[in-house]
Each structure stands twice: as structure tokens, then as C-alpha cells.
Image: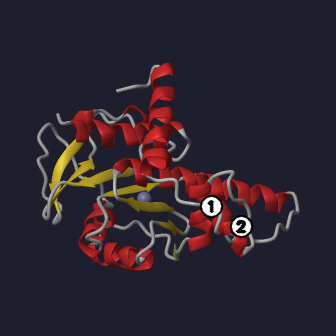
Amino acid sequence: MSDLHATVAMACRILADQGLAADVLGHVSVRLDAERILLRCRGPEDRGLLFTTADNIRVVDLDGRGELDGGYAIPNEFHIHTELFRARPDVSAVVHAHPRDVMIADLAGITLRQVFGAYNIPASRLAQQGVPVYPRSVLVRTPELGRAVAAAIGDSGACILRGHGVVTAGESVEQATLRALDLAELSRISTELALLGGRPQILPDDDTQELPDLGSSFNDLSRWRHYARRLEIAGLAL
Ligand SMILES: [Zn+2]
């Protein structure tokens, strides 16, 4: 098993530990080359995302053929990954999860607005850019549906699948994972503000200009190490 297998497995554990994947639903992938990805697959003894092992991470091609010994199966919704990789050469990693907090905010009709800044700059920028919504609550189990989801995502790094979950994309597994965590945090804050009856203003332009992208090593890698360490302390490391 490569380091990349372990990184994808760790992403699944972090998503589950942070409440974005309740039990067995959701998967993470990373591009290997033009035709192949590593994808979280399901074995006959699968125990869910929190207990993902490096062995759960399998090489799969963009047509859904994989190295699936040991009774492993590709998830039904692998098209979310393969069609996004086809549509977006800039994307190296994809997360699909079913975070309850994001679904509730969207179904409640709450628009994710940029109402906070330095509290969490990546989440703030996500709100500024706008998070597109794929409006159908279907299981994405055909290439056509996968292409429709990819079209909804467009050139964004995150998308809400209404009544279903989220897709996030990134230059690395770490970035796609942290983006999913940020989308969940943005949704929780937006819901809580709505419940409190708050109507905060959107940040003025001269404030958003003072919210720089602090770079991947800070936004993604240092936060990744934090969440990985939390798993270790909890006895949930790989
Ligand atoms: Zn799903």
C-alpha cells in the first residue's frame, strides 16, 4: 500500500470523525493518471468510513473497472468521481459525503452568505464564491447523472446535492477533505444564525480584500495534521 492509499483512508476517517459521514455512506478518491484513480471501495466486512483501512482503497479506471479481489465492490455512486475527473483536468481529488448539517441548511432554504471573515478564511471564501446546488436528490448511479452533477459543480470546488450530500474537489486529498469540513461549518453557522433570527450583513469589499488565501500548507496540511492527530489520540488512527 502506498502513502496515497493511507491518505485516502485517513480522509474517510476524518470526515466520519467530524460528523460528515454517519456510517457507511460516502467515499473519497484521488487521481493516479489519465485513466486511473484510487477510490474508497466496499469490502464484504465493511464497517463504515470511520474504520476505513488502506485495503479499502482500490485502483479503479474511469469506466468503473477495478482491482477488486477479496469480494470488494465499487460504490454505486462512483460516477460522481469519474465524471468529475473527466470534466475537470485541474481536479486531483474528490470527496463525496452525506453531511446532515449541509443538507438541513439547504433544505431549510438557507443561502450560504459571506457573513464572517477571519474566523475561518477558507469557509468565508467558499461563501463568497457561492456554492452551487444540484437540485435532484437521486442516487448518482449512471454516467449521465454523474455528468449532470459535474455540470452543476462547474468550475467550483464544492457543490451541494440537495436532499443527498456534498461533493468537494481539490488539488489534493487534503484540500478536498478540508473543503468539505469548511462547507459543513459554513452550513452550521448559517443555520444557527437563522435560528437566532440574526440577519448579519455580507462583508464589505474592503474587508474581503483583507482575507488572503493563506496557502495550502496552512489551510490544508497543517489542519489535516490537526485532525489526523485527533484521530490518533482517540485511538482511531489507521
Ligand atoms: Zn451519496
Q: Which mark is residue 207?
A: 2
Relative image position of residue 142 (x, y in whole percent): 29, 71
Q: Which mark is residue 199?
A: none
Mark yes or no: residue 189 visible.
Answer: yes
Whether 182 is drawn above or below 152: the answer is above
Which kind of residue does numbered mark 1 sit on?
A: Leu
Disc 2 residue crowd, few under 14, some 14–19, many 20+, Cα 10 Å: few
Disc 1 residue crowd, few under 14, some 14–19, many 20+, Cα 10 Å: some
Q: Which residue is mark 1?
A: 211
Relative image position of residue 196 (x, y in whole percent): 87, 57
Residue drawn at 41 percent across, 56 percent down: 96
Q: Quadrant of residue 128?
A: bottom right
- Ligand 1 quadrant? bottom left
Choose between 231 and 39: the one closer to the eye.
Answer: 231
Left or right of 101 on screen, residue 170: left
Left or right of 159 on screen, residue 72: left
Which kind of residue does numbered mark 2 sit on?
A: Asp
Residue drawn at 56 percent across, 53 percent down: 182
Relative image position of residue 9 (x, y in whole percent): 33, 38
Residue drawn at 36 percent across, 74 percent down: 150
Proximity of marks 2 and 1: CB atoms separated by less than 8 Å: yes
- In what quadrant of the picture does the C terminus appear? top left
- How many marks are shown on the rendered structure? 2
Relative image position of residue 152 (x, y in whole percent): 44, 78
Choose between 226 and 137: the one closer to the eye.
Answer: 226
Left or right of 88 on screen, residue 226: right
Q: Spatial distance from mark 2 to mark 1, Cα to Cα?
A: 7 Å
Residue drawn at 45 percent across, 23 percent down: 232
